[in-house]
Image: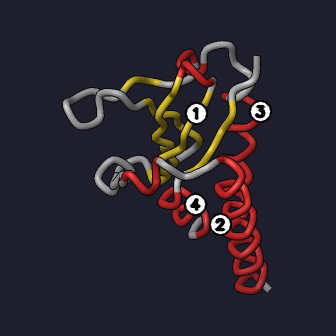
Amino acid sequence: MAWQIDYTRQAQRQLAKLDKAAVRRILDYMDQQVASQTDPRSLGKALTGAKLGSYWRYRVGDYRIICDIQDGILHVLVISIGIVNKSIENLEVTNRDLGLRSASAKSMLTKLTSRALNNCSRSAG
């Protein structure tokens, strides 16, 4: 049973700002570890509080990944990605983000990740 991983526009923008190694680690973790679990909650921790109580978080190095796990359709929606101390402070979810279709999310993520990787290679060289 494989879970589908999608990214909101906000998460895509946050990924595009990260360095190449961090992007790879986060994407690999979500695709290889979380997506392959029978219950993705086994790897994460539940957030608490009225505003964030339905979300889960995963920690990859210094980054926190905030997700909405949708059991009925085997879907994990990545809402926010950020440095551990700032990821919840910067969490802004809009209906437009949550309504993002899977194909468009993957297409946009591919473009943004490519752009981020190109920017990293230019600044390193």
Q: CA distance from mark 1 to mark 2?
A: 23 Å
x and y, in percent, of residue 72 in the image? 55, 19
Q: Nearer the viewer, mark 3 or mark 1?
A: 1
Which is closer to the viewer, label 1 or label 2? 1
Colouring scheme, one of rainbow, by chain, secondary structure, one colour: secondary structure
The type of residue carrying mark 2 is Asp
* Residue carrying label 1: 76
Mark 2 — residue? Answer: 19
What type is the residue that disc 4 sits on? Gln
Answer whether labels 3 and 2 touch (C-beta < 8 Å): no
Location of mark 3 (residue): 32
- 81 shown above or below 44: below
- Which-is-in-front pick, marks 3 and 2? 3
Separation of disc 3 and disc 1 at Cα?
13 Å
Residues 4 and 123: in front is 4
Q: Earlier in the sequence, mark 4 or mark 1?
A: 4
Residue 114 in the image: state x and y as whole percent.
Answer: 76, 70
Secondary element under disc 2, as helix, strand or loop, is: loop
Label 1 secondary element: strand
* Residue tagged 4: 12
Q: Nearer the viewer's eye, disc 3 or disc 4?
A: 4
How far is disc 4 from disc 1 in space, using C-alphas?
14 Å
Q: Is residue 117 left or right of residue 65?
A: right
The amino acid type of the residue labelled 3 equals Gln
Q: Position of residue 93 (x, y in %)?
A: 36, 51
